Image (cartoon, rainbow, N blue to C red):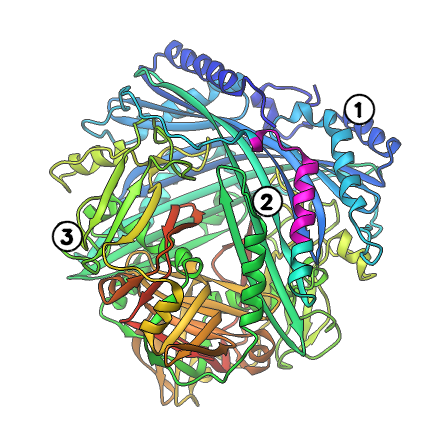
């Protein structure tokens, strides 16, 4: 038995879950059999989700999940084994090593072997304590806070339905490696969201809202939930009857949610060095080059406490730090894990993240923010726009990192005419090419902070934060 | 890949958890158990970059008490007592739904094609050989082409459901899938295409997927200048259409959303909602269907449900709880389960969702070349970016495409670099529509599996060239 105990109450406490002696023996066994490197990472998650439909409890799901993944690097190739049967992981050393060697045997002489950049070997525990631990939050409290949104959101006869949702999680990770790394860390995330649906005859629209971040109940309590519900209702009612957005190239002003999604999709993903190494990034070979307007400085920062994409240690055991992706328009840093850092002879910068204990780490973003500029406010940003669009709230986005093309969609928008907001429009999406649009950013307000929390998919889903100031793009394809 | 007695083991554990429910005084309970195993390989930068294997599973406990329900999930059966108490505690805070009971046991039809012994017998080395074949094929087809990403995977899973109402069923299923992202980067121009395919049985020809990826990477290199924004006919290949369709349509046919006014088809039962030659069937009994099976995920026998019949909205899909709830709320006068409960695994309770959703036409269907001739002028779109941003409530979408071909005089004259593509799915499907003649499953999503052909839509769509 690898786990110290199978008693569920202790399994999900703050104690150690991996039997250190047995894991150490398994890792030593891997290197004795010829592995260059081996690691075992366990993640236990205590989760609670809940939702209301029209103000009534629809579902509440408490969950306790645990998964463990072993990675073995042998002959310059990876073998991986993941399982929720954590007691069996030590038995998988030999088959996983064989997998790695079988992959390595297929590598042609022209193809690079995988290597890992050196990192400090650390043995420690880091536990980010929430002010109000999510595990102490009861269902009544969750319902009460969701109702705070619901009560305001439904207050109109044209609102035909409301739904609100809750998610909180306590994440506990243990990592042991053949190099002697032995780290344990834990932290929490909390999220509340909602959606209102409005109908007028055959015209039906919906509007979504979301608030959350790293931390416990205090994250939710810090939000004026009534105002969030009220604003969602007002937005949904405004969308009813709003005309279809114009199509074509025009100036675009984005609120901080959309600015965040834009910078995440258009810049963040192409900066992921595993995509660069795969030949699937438009930013390959561009480190040190000017790729954007000089007013653009972009940081990806997992240490930004409170952001939904925070984490204290990355999933390879590397300490986190802010990464300056662009400084004054110049591409200065890729997001790396140990493998890509080795390949490009760079320092690892703590960019390795896995979805959970059943997945291996990839290069991922955390909290990605474009820094503030010099414009005072929205009025100043739009005062010299003859005709354009002001777009707000994100419905998500997507990027083709190789081509460098991206798309993101807004929840609502206004036409800008002669320096003022005129009428609302709907179904606004924006697309473009990363290397063109970044140069077209010509205005940023001073205040930059994270927008609504989000989720990023790249085969695996991880929570992220993104945001910035209000941003003006001289010309974007709106459609 | 999977132990011979996997189902028996799951069933045994589920029964023990059920007994623990009984011991806790719970009269209505449902234990859903799953255990999956798989092997996969990742392709990156023209090579196999990683091979992996493993398994995961667990149990979901749903209990019902006086029409109130609670749910909890767990990995380790020894912690069932705690999970049962959690589920009970939640049930007691949940609203009581008059008439809601767990479904009773009914005999269920057998659905074949759910597992393939050839997959069960596959080892990691077999998968690596398939990877070699795929990479070799890319190089054979075009020396410039590189498989920049993708992977191949095989999986086998066991599932079981045991309930207090006498349902005891379980089975084994298999899957085999490939995804391949090919790009051609030459002369400062990069084109690419992602193609995927999956099946319950062993995929006989992985190279078909590769051929298509290389073809679209090649054909989109013949760039022409984009014209003006225009409302025009658009032919979406099945691959391009399926993701958009999957975001918008499966949600519109849920009984709950229809009853609450959350569907663009709300209030239109028995009215024409699509072109009068189009039909939509949700088939939970499809042989080898990726979202089919003899029972749904709460143990109700699956069925074939007609949703749109010759353009007329003729049906909707329900889970047991949704049906009882909407009746008790007075939103509908009557409703009952259509065997349409699904769940993402043991960690979620059953919710209403479609299974294998088929779009078909009673009119003449045509091969792609003929559809292009019919279109005369317009565009062909093979993939879109941002399908997930489509609005399932209204049917509106505004997405982007980089695999778009311009058609003039019934012939393809070249490719655009990029274009915006917008419209309303409901309106487009109720206008003039012609379907292609080959309807294959084109993707499995969280919303079910879509079976759609190429679709030529002549009305209500806008192309906005970059």
Can you say whether A332 is above or below B298 in the image?
below
Q: Give the image location of residue A330, x and y in percent.
A: 70, 76
**Mark number, residue A21:** 1
At x 70%, y 48%, the residue is B132
Q: What distance separates the C-alpha of mark 1 from that of mark 2?
A: 27 Å
User: Circle 2: is it few (<14), some (14-19), or many (20+) Cα within 10 Å?
Assistant: some
Q: Using the image as rendered, state which of residue B77 and residue B438 is in the foreground.
A: B438
Proximity of marks 1 and 3: CB atoms separated by less than 8 Å:
no
Left or right: residue A64 versus residue A161 is right
Q: CA distance from mark 1 to mark 3?
A: 65 Å
* SS for callout 1: helix
Q: Is residue B28 left or right of residue A388?
A: left
> Does the stretch in magenta take in B131?
yes
Q: Earlier in the sequence, mark 1 or mark 2?
A: 1
Callout 2: chain: A
Q: Is residue B249 visible?
A: yes
For the residues carrying marks 1 and 3, which lies nearer the camera in this image? Answer: 3
Seen in the picture, residue A367 relative to A137 is either above or below; the reply is below
Residue A76 in percent (x, y) is at 82, 47
Residue position for label 2: A355
Q: Which residues are magenta?
A: B118-135
Q: Nearer the viewer, mark 3 or mark 2?
A: 3
């Amino acid at each position: 038995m690898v786990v110290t105990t199978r008693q569920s109450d202790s399994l999900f406490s703050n104690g150690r879950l991996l039997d250190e002696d047995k894991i150490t023996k398994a890792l030593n066994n891997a290197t004795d059999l010829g592995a260059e490197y081996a690691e075992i990472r366990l993640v236990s998650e205590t989760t609670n989700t809940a939702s209301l439909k029209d103000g009534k409890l629809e579902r509440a799901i408490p969950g306790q999940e645990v998964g463990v993944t072993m990675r073995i690097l042998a002959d310059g190739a990876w073998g991986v084994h993941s399982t929720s049967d954590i007691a069996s992981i030590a038995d998988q050393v030999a088959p996983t090593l064989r997998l790695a060697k079988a992959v390595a045997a297929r590598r042609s002489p022209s193809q690079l072997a995988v290597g890992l950049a050196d990192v400090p070997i650390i043995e420690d525990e880091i536990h980010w304590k929430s002010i109000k631990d999510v595990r102490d939050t009861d269902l009544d409290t969750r319902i009460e806070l969701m109702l705070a949104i619901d009560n305001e959101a439904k207050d109109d006869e044209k609102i035909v339905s409301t739904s609100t949702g809750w998610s909180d999680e306590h994440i506990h990770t243990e990592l042991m490696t053949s190099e002697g790394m032995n780290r344990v860390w834990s932290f929490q995330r909390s999220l509340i969201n909602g959606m209102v649906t409005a109908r007028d005859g055959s015209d039906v629209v919906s509007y979504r809202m979301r608030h959350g971040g790293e931390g416990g109940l205090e994250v939710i309590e810090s939000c004026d939930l009534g105002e969030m519900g009220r604003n969602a209702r007002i937005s949904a009612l405004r969308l009813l009857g709003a005309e279809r957005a114009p199509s074509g190239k025009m100036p675009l002003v984005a609120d901080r949610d959309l600015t965040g999604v834009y910078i995440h999709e258009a810049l963040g993903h192409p900066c992921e060095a595993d995509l660069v190494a795969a030949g699937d990034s438009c930013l390959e070979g561009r480190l040190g080059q000017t790729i954007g307007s000089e007013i653009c400085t972009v940081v990806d920062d997992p240490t930004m406490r409170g952001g939904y994409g925070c984490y204290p240690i990355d999933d390879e055991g590397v300490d986190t730090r802010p990464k300056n992706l662009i400084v004054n328009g110049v591409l200065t840093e890729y997001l790396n894990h140990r493998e890509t850092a080795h390949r490009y002879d760079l320092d690892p910068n703590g960019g390795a993240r896995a979805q959970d204990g059943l997945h291996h780490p990839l290069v991922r973003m955390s909290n990605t923010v474009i820094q503030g500029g010099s414009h005072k406010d929205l009025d100043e940003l739009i005062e010299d726009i003859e005709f354009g669009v002001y777009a707000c709230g994100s419905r998500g986005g997507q990027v083709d990192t190789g081509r460098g093309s991206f798309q993101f969609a807004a929840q609502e928008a206004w036409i800008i005419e002669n320096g003022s907001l005129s009428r609302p429009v709907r179904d606004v999406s924006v697309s473009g090419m990363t290397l063109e649009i970044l140069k077209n950013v010509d205005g940023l307000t001073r205040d930059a902070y994270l927008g609504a929390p989000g989720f990023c998919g790249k085969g695996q889903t991880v929570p992220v934060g993104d945001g910035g100031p209000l941003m003006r793009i001289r010309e974007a394809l709106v459609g | 890949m999977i132990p011979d007695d996997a189902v028996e083991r799951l069933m045994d554990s589920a029964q023990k958890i059920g007994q623990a429910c009984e011991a806790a005084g719970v009269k209505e309970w449902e234990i859903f158990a799953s255990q999956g195993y798989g092997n996969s390989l990742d392709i990156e930068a023209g090579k196999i970059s990683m091979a992996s294997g493993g398994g995961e599973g667990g149990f979901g406990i749903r209990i019902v008490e006086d029409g109130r329900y609670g749910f909890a999930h767990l990995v380790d059966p020894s912690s069932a007592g705690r999970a049962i108490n959690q589920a009970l505690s939640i049930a007691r805070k949940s609203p009581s739904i008059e008439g809601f009971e767990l479904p009773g046991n009914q005999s269920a039809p057998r659905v074949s094609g759910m597992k393939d012994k050839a997959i069960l017998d596959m080892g990691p080395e077999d998968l690596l050989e398939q990877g070699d074949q795929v990479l070799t094929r890319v190089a054979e087809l075009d020396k410039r082409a590189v498989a920049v990403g993708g992977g191949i995977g095989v999986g086998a899973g066991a599932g079981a459901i045991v309930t207090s109402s006498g349902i005891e069923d379980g089975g084994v299923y298999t899957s085999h899938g490939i995804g391949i992202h090919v790009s051609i980067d030459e002369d400062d121009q990069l084109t690419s295409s992602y193609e995927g395919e999956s099946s319950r049985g062993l995929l006989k020809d992985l190279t078909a997927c590769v051929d298509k990826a290389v073809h679209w990477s090649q054909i989109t290199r013949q760039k022409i200048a984009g014209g003006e924004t225009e409302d025009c006919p658009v032919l979406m290949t099945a691959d391009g259409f399926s993701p958009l369709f999957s975001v918008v349509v499966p949600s519109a046919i849920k009984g709950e959303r229809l009853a609450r006014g959350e569907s663009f088809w709300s209030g239109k039962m028995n009215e024409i909602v699509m072109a009068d030659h189009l039909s939509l069937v949700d088939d939970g009994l499809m042989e080898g269907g990726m979202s089919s099976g003899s029972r749904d995920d709460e143990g109700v026998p699956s069925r074939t449900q007609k949703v749109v019949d010759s353009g007329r909205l003729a049906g909707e899909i329900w889970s047991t709880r949704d049906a009882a709830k909407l009746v008790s709320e007075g939103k509908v006068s009557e409703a009952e389960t259509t065997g349409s409960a699904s769940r993402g695994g043991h960690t979620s309770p059953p919710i209403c969702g479609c299974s294998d959703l088929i779009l078909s036409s009673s009119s003449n269907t045509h091969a792609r070349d003929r559809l292009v001739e019919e279109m005369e002028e317009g565009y062909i779109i093979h993939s879109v970016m941002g399908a997930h941003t489509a609005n399932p409530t209204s049917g509106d979408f505004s997405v982007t495409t980089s695999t778009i071909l311009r058609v003039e005089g019934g012939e393809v004259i070249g490719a655009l670099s990029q274009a915006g593509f917008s419209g309303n799915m409901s309106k487009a499907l109720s206008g003039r529509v012609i379907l292609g003649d080959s309807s294959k499953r084109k993707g499995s999503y969280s919303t079910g599996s879509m079976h759609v052909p190429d679709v030529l839509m002549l009305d209500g769509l806008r192309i906005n060239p970059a």
